[in-house]
Image (cartoon, rainbow, N blue to C red):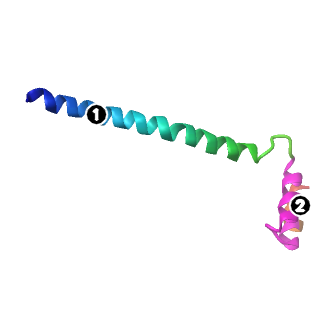
Amino acid sequence: MMGGGFGMGWWWIIGIVVLIAIIWPLAQRFNRNNSASQSPGKSALDILKERYAKGEIDKQEFEERKKDLM
């Protein structure tokens, strides 16, 4: 009867390890997808142009930030 309590503690540890084994690969995949969207070879001006083309910023903001970069 006393051994049952000790065994119960092991099930908690095993459960936590299983959860980590499931969550860890998902987190790694999410991080890879995020970092892949930002190419290291692009200049700040290229990124600014892309944001303007996507409509994330308007013409006034584009011109202000472009002036800051130059």
Give yes or no for residue 61 being in the magenta stretch.
yes
**Kind of residue at badge 1:** Trp
Residue 52 horizontal/vertical position (percent)? 86, 64
**Main structural element of the magenta stretch: helix, strand or loop?**
helix
Q: Secondary structure at mark 1?
A: helix
Identify the residue under disc 2. Answer: 66
> Does residue 62 appear to the left or right of 8 in the view shown?
right
> Does residue 28 appear to the left or right of 6 in the view shown?
right
Whichever of labels 2 and 1 marks the residue nearer the N terminus, that label is: 1
Residue at horizontal 62 percent and vertical 45 percent from the top: 30
Which range of residues does the magenta coloring cover?
43-62
- Between 45 and 37, the residue placed more toward the observer is 37
Image height of 51 relative to 36, above or below = below
Identify the residue under disc 1. Answer: 11
Image height of 42 relative to 7, above or below = below
Residue at horizontal 84 percent and vertical 64 percent from the top: 54
Residue at horizontal 84 percent and vertical 72 percent from the top: 58
Tell whether label 1 touches label 2 (CB within 8 Å).
no
**Residue 39: quadrant of the picture:** top right
Q: Give the total of numbered labels.
A: 2
